[in-house]
Amino acid sequence: MKQLMFIFGILILGQAVSGQSDKKLLKSWIKVESVDLSGNAAGPDTIYTRYSFGKERVNISFYPAWDDFDMNYSLQGNQIIIGVQSYTIDELTDSTFTIQAPGFRLLKFKAEGYLCQHPGVLRQIGEKNSLPLYEATDTLSPRYTKGKLDMALNKYSNGYNVIQASYFRMEFTITENGKVEDVVVTKSISYGFDKGMVEGITKTSGKWKPAYCKGKPVQTRMFFERRYLNSSGMGRTSGQ
């Protein structure tokens, strides 16, 4: 009986530890370091990467302002499977998450909420409605909640066919309530194209999660730009 009680106690303890690990994981993590363990890397990995964990699924994004790829994950002890890739968890604290796939790579993340508390991250560029207005960065970014922003704006190009290298850029504010305000085109392609893009970004108002710092929403000034090389264009936002 004592042996059974001892085993039962170990199981309960293991579940408690696992539960604590789960809670620590449930947040957004931004990659701060990537180490190639295969010896085949062509160069340093400097691509913005964010893992946002929910209870059963994780979103992996390469853009600060929206989410990209959603997939399942499972956690068992110090092992985590993300999609089909298995990793060993080297460290999991409130602020740091480090995983590695032996012979492949090691990834080190910092909690998004932790990073935006660092001195210098809050770059105040003015005031709006008597509140500070900050510059959006890869660690302090609002997030579009209805898919990929560049895809959402595609239908507002008014059928404009870009046939030569061009550059478009607009700046706008995301308020602490997720509203889009003060849209300004700073690099124009044409009147019709510009008008469509302004209309498109304005219609996303209210569909943004504002940037957060120290647990509170803040208003940020950001940009959306699109570079066309011949007839192809890729969208890009602040922080990339």
Image: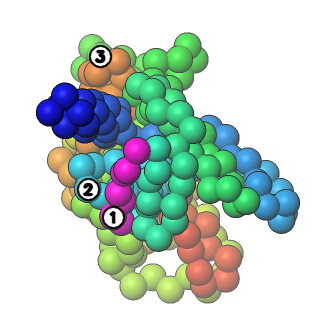
Q: Is residue 223 visible?
A: no
Task: Return the residue at label 2.
Answer: 56
**Residue 195 in picture, x, y percent from top left:** 36, 65
As displayed, is residue 13 above or below residue 129? below
Q: Is residue 79 visible?
A: yes
Cα gap from disc 3 to disc 1, whole angstroms: 39 Å
Q: Nearer the viewer, residue 185 or 130?
A: 130
As displayed, is residue 153 above or below residue 169? below
In the rendered structure, which segment of residues is drawn in magenta? 70-77
Mark 2: give few (<14), some (14-19) or many (20+) Cα within 10 Å: few
Q: Nearer the viewer, residue 13 or 203?
A: 13
**Residue 123 in picture, x, y percent from top left:** 52, 21
- The three-letter amino acid code for the residue at tag 2 is Glu
**Residue 81 in picture, x, y percent from top left:** 44, 60
Q: Nearer the viewer, mark 3 or mark 1?
A: 1
| Mark found first going from the N terminus, 1 or 2 | 2
Task: Return the residue at label 1.
Answer: 72
- The three-letter amino acid code for the residue at tag 3 is Leu
Task: For mark 2, give the secondary structure.
Answer: loop
**Residue 116 in picture, x, y percent from top left:** 46, 25
- Which residue does the image show at 36% across and 66% down from the upper left? 71
- Which residue does the image show at 14% across and 33% down from the upper left? 1
Q: Is residue 126 left or right of residue 146?
A: right
Task: Return the residue at label 3.
Answer: 131
- Which residue does the image show at 67% across and 56% down from the upper left? 102
Task: For mark 3, give the secondary structure.
Answer: strand
